[in-house]
Amino acid sequence: MRLFFAIASMGLVVGCAQTAEHPGSIFSISEPLIAVIGDEIFSGEATGYLDGTGTIRMQSQKDPNLKCIGDFHYVSSKSGTGSATCIGGTRGLLVFQALSNLSGYGTAISDRRPVSFAYGLSLEDSSKYLRIPEGKKLARKGDVLEWMAE
């Protein structure tokens, strides 16, 4: 929630959107999101709204047709909870910790595979918070994220 108070108090409007999902919320900010579900890499974005809620949208780097959507809300100035559902039915309940007004990390209890994610961080910094398979590291090849041997 600090994120949104900081935006409002500074008068900084990074993005404005009035959507069907949040008709009363005209201020929003989106940050890149990287997630590891099992051993599969997902990327997308987390969008937060002034009321302390937000949405998550991401897709698999291996199969772009595999997409997940969800929502979240802050329960304190530094933490929150939410849920996400992926095509195919995988569902997860997530918890996250904010590192700053625009970044953080979390995990999810999935009904199928372990999930970790980071938002608003560089690839290198995100890697510190992700469950990366042993002997691999996360790398960017053009616009795609992939595993490489360490």
Image (cartoon, rainbow, N blue to C red):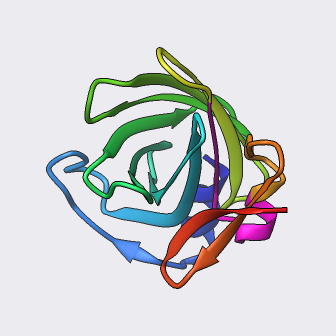
Q: Residue 16 location, x and y as percent?
A: 33, 72
Residue 26's place in the image compared with 74, above or below, is: below
Q: Which residue is farthest top?
A: 111
Q: Which residue is drawn at 74% across and 42% down?
A: 133
Image quadrant in which you'd find residue 145: bottom right
Q: In the rendered structure, does residue 90 fall within the stretch colored magenta?
A: no
Q: Which residue is farthest bottom?
A: 142
Image quadrant in which you'd find residue 103: bottom right
Q: Which residue is drawn at 72% across and 71% down?
A: 122
Give 26 or 123, whichever is nearer the viewer. 123
Give 55 or 128, whichever is nearer the viewer. 128
Q: In the rendered structure, does residue 120 fall within the stretch colored magenta?
A: yes
Residue 80's place in the image compared with 65, above or below, is: above
Q: Residue 62 location, x and y as percent?
A: 42, 57
Q: Which residue is drawn at 58% across and 34% down?
A: 38
Magenta highlight range: 115-126
Image quadrant in which you'd find residue 102: bottom right
Give 93 or 30, whichever is nearer the viewer. 93
Q: Residue 144 location, x and y as percent?
A: 50, 73
Q: Residue 119 location, x and y as percent?
A: 62, 56
